[in-house]
Amino acid sequence: MLKPQNKKASVLALCGKGGVGKTSLSATIVKILSSDSDNKVLAIDADPAVGLSTALGIDVTKTVDDIRNELIRRVESGKTTDKMEMLSMLDYEMLSAMKENNNIAFLAIGRPEKEGCYCQVNHILKDLIVSMADNFDFVVIDGEAGIEQVNRRVMEKVTHLILVSDASAKGLNVAKTIKKVSDTAIEYEKTGLILNRLRSKDEYEKLVIPAELDCLGWVPEDDTIRSFDIEGKSILEIKDSPAIKSVKNCLSEIGIRVSLKREKTEEKTDNRNRKSAVALTG
């Protein structure tokens, strides 16, 4: 799953108020980006609830914080003191925590159990995550409500900060606050707002969007994605839907255009099949 090192990965971090559909949106973005088999995509679940794994149909057996806490226990008990031994252990454990499925890899950050300052361990883990991310074309981070946790526990720089809100005033206010905090809490190249789970274009046009938020577009409430979410089925299994089309448009607005090579190939195949069927019946 290695890619040429001269190409920098596009790192997308999604943040917003709880309940606005960040996880489903993150999974949808992973689906879109991975639709071209040439793209290597790393999905990082930075939300302690670890909902992205369910949305992608991935079974999590180990998280980054499991590794962190085990290392801290070993250091405190005197079992690990040598720096090279510690680095070797972390490197091995991080690779074993990563789940791979075709051109998608998944890494869960988890919930920290140990309190206190373990700055050296945290810095090493972040460096390892950044190093692993360099092997991918795209990295999608499903974050918590605030961007600070992405900075502290995952990486300090992203290329695309995507703010997510629903139609509620509270959701928009949280997105506005995250944008303000992000200007000093994390480095990013581009940012934009996606309005999620809207009922209609009319609802979108009536919204008063804060001037400092660059709106990339809106995503409709989608019955297919909703049913997959309720049933715990992988969003990767959805072939197409209104929400997926809308998310593609939003990504295009922030400068991310995915090759439609596979989709065109499938379309040609469908057309050939239809022509064959017509010929047989004719």
Image (tube, rainbow, N blue to C red):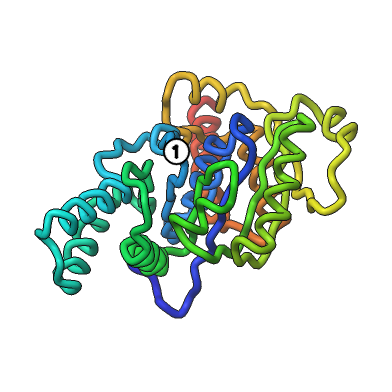
Check disc 1 and give the amino acid type. Answer: Leu
Task: Name the residue: 66% across, 52% down.
Answer: 251
Picture quarter containing residue 83?
A: bottom left
Residue highlighted by disc 1: 52
Q: Secondary structure at mark 1?
A: helix
Vertical order, 282 against 256 (above or below): above
Does the image show residue 19?
A: yes
Query: Residue 247 appears at what percent x and percent y?
Result: 65, 43
Query: Residue 185 appears at what percent x and percent y?
Result: 61, 61
Picture quarter containing residue 259?
A: bottom right
Query: Residue 184 appears at what percent x and percent y?
Result: 66, 63
User: Which quadrant of the rendered structure holds the C terminus?
Assistant: top right
Left or right? Give the position of 119 relative to 174: left
Vertical order, 264 against 204 (above or below): below
Task: Name the residue: 26% across, 57% down.
Answer: 94
Residue that sits furthest to the bottom in the current view = 6
Left or right? Give the position of 172 relative to 153: right
Please tell me how many numbered marks the rendered image carries. 1
Picture quarter containing residue 75?
A: bottom left
Vertical order, 50 against 138 (above or below): above
Front residue (pair 186, 30): 186
Residue that sits furthest to the left in the current view = 79
Task: Name the residue: 15% across, 67% down.
Answer: 81
Vertical order, 3 against 235 (above or below): below
Label 1, residues with CA under 10 Å away: few <14, some 14-19, many ≥20: many
Front residue (pair 136, 61): 61
Task: Name the residue: 41% across, 77% down.
Answer: 5
Query: Residue 233 appears at what percent x and percent y?
Result: 42, 26
User: Which quadrant of the rendered structure holds the N terminus?
Assistant: bottom left
Does the image show residue 1?
A: no
